[in-house]
């Protein structure tokens, strides 16, 4: 049978794809410059100046946990509301604006004002993570199944490149503040927060203008939709429990992404523990970002050619090798090589997981299903650090502790092997019920 004119259309529109991916280019600067780079250092040395190190660490941890907990609770409900009102872009704009405003406001927080800095940071993270729920869910409006692996990878790739480039520029600002007419590194870091806000805002514009979401069945956004959102959330949870393939994938994803996030979050601490300098660890972070750009693109091609499961399995295999190598590491150059190895597969595992999930969920319920997906992502790095710590204490060797992460990667891969993507796609189509 000949395809219809509609089905004969290109699988994706380049303008929409690039516009969608540029949001990742913009908001990733928050993840690199603020979350991973300067905020933890500045919080301890400037906003919590004079406080014991243990106390400032507790405050920072509490801020991170508070923001993540809020998103864990709110994301699935907001996703359900957004699907009912076809309001993914409006929610994305709301959260992006919140994150941009709070990031820029960090410039004005005075020395010693750790409470105000914490509040700005919490709302900045909520803006960043909340926006990602709706950014991810817009993927189904941008591309069809044939190119979804490549487009998902493109988003992560541009995120690595955009976030890495601005972070490199901001690091240069702190190293040579006199070049920019600044009084010193502290002022340079404050201006870096402004640069992130502007960068994020600029690259949010394309997705708001050029990406259109399906308006079929759209309902006006009203307060009563909150109740509908809770009702839809319960329904979605019941659906996920009944959809064995989706449930199996989410459980496997939670395990292996917990291993991925644990390595990312514990790498700097591990490097410091075995005697490496902080300056070298910042360089390692830059290496991961820059290597991640071409590698994420490459994994997108692997997903297109061999399927997303194969690509994820490759990434998990490399992570297991990295974990074993980390046990034996003794030189700083090896730490840089490990950072490059992480960069090779981190974006690939993340992007192909997203594109695989896009395949097996109903398109017209993408925001609420991605609410659950992102909720599990926020729960990630819960088991891993505890497992590492317990094994390290029990064995009396922190290097043995990192080997425990192999359990998470292996268990996640085992569950992923039971996910039949073709069957999941068929079931997702059946769930895409027509709107009245």
Image (spheres, rainbow, N blue to C red):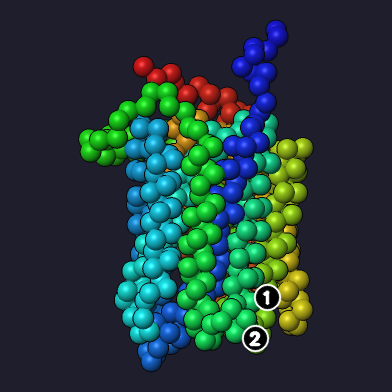
Query: Which residue corresponds to the image point at 74% horizontal and 54% vertical from the top-left?
Result: 294
Residue 156: give its label: none
Residue 432 vertical placement versus 23 (above, below): above
In percent of width and height, residue 205 lies at 51, 47
Determine which residue is flagged by label 2.
Answer: 277
Q: Residue at x 64, y 86 (%)?
A: 277
The image quarter in which residue 259 lies:
bottom right
Question: Does 147 appear above or below 61?
Answer: above
Q: From the viewer's perspective, is residue 20 above or below residue 85?
A: below
State the residue in front, 195 or 404.
195
Provide residue 418's location: percent of width, then percent of height: 62, 39
Image spot of residue 213 (x, y percent)? 48, 32
* Front residue of 21 and 198: 198
Instruction: Return the mark for residue 283.
Output: 1
Give the Cα separation between the discs numbered 1 and 2. 10 Å
SS for callout 1: helix
């Amino acid at each position: 049978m000949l395809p219809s004119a509609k089905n004969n259309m290109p699988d994706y529109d380049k303008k929409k794809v690039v516009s969608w991916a540029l949001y990742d280019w913009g908001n990733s600067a928050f993840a690199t410059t603020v979350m991973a780079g300067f905020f933890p250092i500045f919080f301890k040395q400037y906003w919590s100046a004079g406080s014991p190190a243990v106390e400032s660490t507790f405050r920072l941890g509490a801020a991170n946990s508070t923001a993540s907990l809020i998103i864990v609770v709110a994301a699935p409900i907001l996703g359900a509301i957004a699907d009912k009102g076809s309001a993914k872009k409006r929610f994305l704009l709301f959260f992006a604006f919140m994150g941009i405003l709070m990031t820029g406001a960090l410039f004005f927080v005075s020395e010693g004002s750790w409470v105000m800095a914490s509040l700005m940071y919490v709302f900045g993270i909520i803006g960043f993570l909340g926006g990602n729920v709706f950014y991810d869910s817009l993927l189904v409006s941008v591309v069809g199944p044939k190119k979804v692996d490549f487009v998902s990878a493109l988003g992560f790739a541009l995120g690595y490149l955009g976030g890495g480039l601005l972070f490199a520029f901001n690091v240069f600002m702190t190293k040579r503040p006199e070049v920019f007419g600044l009084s010193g590194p502290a002022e340079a870091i404050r201006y870096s927060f402004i640069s992130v806000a502007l960068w994020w805002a600029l690259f949010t514009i394309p997705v708001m203008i050029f990406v259109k979401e399906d308006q079929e069945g759209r309902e006006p956004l009203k307060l009563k939709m909150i109740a509908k959102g809770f009702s839809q959330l319960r329904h979605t949870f019941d659906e996920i429990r009944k959809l064995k393939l989706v449930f199996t994938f989410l459980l496997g994803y939670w395990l292996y992404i917990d291993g991925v996030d644990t390595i990312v979050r514990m790498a700097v601490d591990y490097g410091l523990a075995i005697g490496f300098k902080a300056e070298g660890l910042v360089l390692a972070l830059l290496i991961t970002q820059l290597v991640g750009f071409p590698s994420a693109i490459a994994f997108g091609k692997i997903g297109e050619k061999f399927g997303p499961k194969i690509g994820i399995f490759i990434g998990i295999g490399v992570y297991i090798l990295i974990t074993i190598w980390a046990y034996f590491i003794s030189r700083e150059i090896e730490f840089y090589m490990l950072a490059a190895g992480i960069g090779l597969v981190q974006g690939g595992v993340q992007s192909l997981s997203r594109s695989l999930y896009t395949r097996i969920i109903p398109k017209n319920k993408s925001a609420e299903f991605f609410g659950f997906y992102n909720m599990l992502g926020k729960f990630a790095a819960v088991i891993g650090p505890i497992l590492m710590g317990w094994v390290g204490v029990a064995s009396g060797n922190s290097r043995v502790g990192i080997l425990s992460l192999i359990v998470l990667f292996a268990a996640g891969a085992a569950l992923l092997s039971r996910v039949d993507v073709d069957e999941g796609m068929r079931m997702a189509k059946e769930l895409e019920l027509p709107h009245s």
